[in-house]
Amino acid sequence: MRTQFMVDGFTPSENAHANMRWLVELAIKEVGCPADAITDLIVADEAHFGAAIHSLAPGLPYTNNENFAAVAKTIKLGVNADLKTSGIVLRDFIVNQALIALDKEWNVRSGEEQRFIYTVWHETAHALDATRQTAVRAAPESPVAPGQLFKVRHLAAFFTEVVLSEIAACRLSAFACSQPMLDLEMDSDRESIRRMLAGLREHTLAHHGDPDDLWRIAFEAAQTFWLPFVQYGKSIAHIAGNPQLRQALDLWADCPPEVETVFKDYVTLLNETFGVYPAAPSDFGDRLTALWVRMAAAYGFRFPEAATGDGVYWRWRTTPATEA
Ligand SMILES: [Zn+2]
């Protein structure tokens, strides 16, 4: 495993390399990932996070916007003697805080402290999941379709892979998720969904017919309704993978009543998917997309398809909670 630091003003000692290697090797052992599956490990500060990812995979998109900024990423690199290999990029503070938190007993660690450790385990689980994929789960790297088009099917293919890969990594590393961490995650999921819905409502109210604006609203709306499947999918996978966790799928503020049935069907779909891992039901993408259509409809949104790019119509059926 090659180790590298991309942190401004920091000259890593032998010890720093050894600590970082020790941390990831511990995760590898506990998650049950083949040791050779992770060939590269880079610790980067905020300014170098993108450059670190691009040093392993030139041009690969990663999450970085006002709502979410990635702090860790696992990148599929290739195949070495039949073993699918990955590289991991971790933000510097994750590594530092995880090393500090590991000195504390499991039962006294706060949700936040456990989350630093968990993040390393979760990325290692992505590398393990990559080794188990018999066919490459072909998926677009970006939610935007070629030609900058808004296409709901392209977005659905993108998010289907996000969900499959996240539920796999979450279930494989669920034993590193504690109850305080799960509670913290659920709180922050509800809050980010509430914030996304409030932002979407604001943008639809401010819209005055500018086509560029409409294009942005279409993406924002489509992704806002995908977000609950990604976030709640992670929690459902944690609960499925760790019998110690108490089930608590509380929905967000002012959630339309239909969402409860959508999530009931989502749990059924995910449980079926866990049972056939590392495969997935052949109709997984279609069933997941149908749930997303119902989620959007619960808020009064629909996305008619057209060859030249899909559209968006809305008539808000519910008032999302406004800024607190
Ligand atoms: Zn992940």
Image (spheres, rainbow, N blue to C red):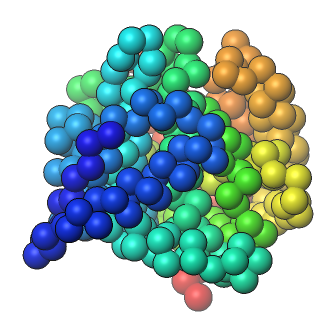
Image spot of residue 231 (x, y percent): 63, 54
Quadrant the C terminus occupies: bottom right
160 left or right of 38?
Answer: right
Horizontal and vertical percent for residue 159? 53, 36
Which quadrant: the N terminus? Answer: top left
Residue 41 seen anywhere in this rendered image of the structure? yes
Horizontal side of residue 316 vs 207, given as left or right: right
Q: Position of residue 62 (x, y in %)?
A: 33, 47
Q: Is residue 214 visible?
A: no
In the image, residue 240 sits, relative to residue 303, either above or below, namely: below
Above or below for 308 versus 46: above
Residue at (79%, 39%) from the top-left corner?
Answer: 266
Q: Nearer the viewer, residue 89 or 265?
A: 89
Residue name at image x 57 percent, y 72 percent = 102
Residue 265 picture quarter: top right
Q: Quadrant of residue 160?
A: top right
Figure label count: 0
- Closest to the observer, 75 or 267: 75
